[in-house]
Image: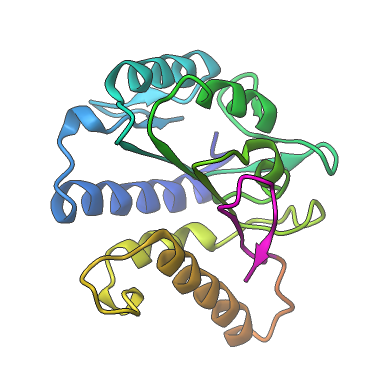
Amino acid sequence: ASGGSQYAQRYDAWRDQLLKILRDEFGYPADHIQVLSDSPSPGTKRSTRENVRSSMDTLRQQTKADDVVLVILIGHGSTGDAEDSKFNLVGPDLSGREWADLLKPLAGRIVFVDTSGGSFPFLKALAAPGRIVLTATNSPGQVFETVFADFFIRSLGDQAADTDKNQKISIQEAFDYASAGVKGWFAEKAQVATEHPALDDSGHGANEES
């Protein structure tokens, strides 16, 4: 749920850029992409709890053990406490623990990216073996609007992110690129950074801070 036109325009632009990269550069067919939005267009669903669950059920039926499932949340988050937080939807929200339950039946390796403020508790809630979790923040107190989504999505289509020059952009490379972008964004504005991205690929909820 965007929470206002000023946010909706930004989120729509990020989502459209991401979809363009997935379809045009990575070659994902339409039936491999599930899109939810609070202002749905043809081919998308409204971002409600019910539709999230429906999309996850579709993915469960599609995925196999050697697949990779990428889930990216773009929007607002809210921190209830250090142990759990929620991602805002149209209607009732979903907590990190509820997202974790939705992911359990999915086969394959999961890459989960929560780009919202207040996302840090998702790191621990969703951590599991064979899974990579990225959050825009590295502490529950970082609840302000974030720019991590902008730089993470850019990284997927920017060869400058390919630091080992193997013609592929790994999640680690995308994370490093986005983290540097966030740091530079605040430095350029001469502001104290209110977000510090975090990554876990150990399954233990350990925090690799940017």
Query: How many marks do you count on the picture?
Result: 0
Position of residue 207 relative to residue 164, above or below, is above
At 58% from the left and 86% from the top, the residue drawn is 188
Q: x, y percentage for residue 171?
A: 42, 59
The colouring scheme, among rainbow, by chain, secondary structure or one colour, is: rainbow
At 41% from the left and 39% from the top, the residue drawn is 109
Segment colored magenta: 195-210
- Residue placed most toward the observer, 71 or 133: 133
Give the side of residue 103 with respect to residue 106, left or right.
Answer: right
Q: x, y percentage for residue 183?
A: 59, 78
Give the side of residue 69 with respect to residue 168, left or right.
Answer: right
The reply to whether residue 113 is visible in this rendering is no
Residue 200, image quadrant: bottom right
Of all residues shown, which one is farthest toward the right?
A: 81
Position of residue 72 relative to residue 146, above or below, is above
Position of residue 208 relative to residue 64, above or below, is below
The quarter of the picture where the C terminus appears is bottom right
Q: x, y percentage for residue 101?
A: 60, 21
The quarter of the picture where the N terminus appears is top right
- Residue placed most toward the observer, 28 or 65: 65
Position of residue 152 relative to residue 38, above or below, is below
Q: Main secondary structure of the magenta part?
A: loop
The reply to whether residue 94 is visible in this rendering is yes
At 52% from the left and 50% from the top, the residue drawn is 6
Q: Is residue 62 magenta?
A: no
Give the side of residue 93 with respect to residue 113, left or right.
Answer: right
At 77% from the left and 57% from the top, the residue drawn is 139
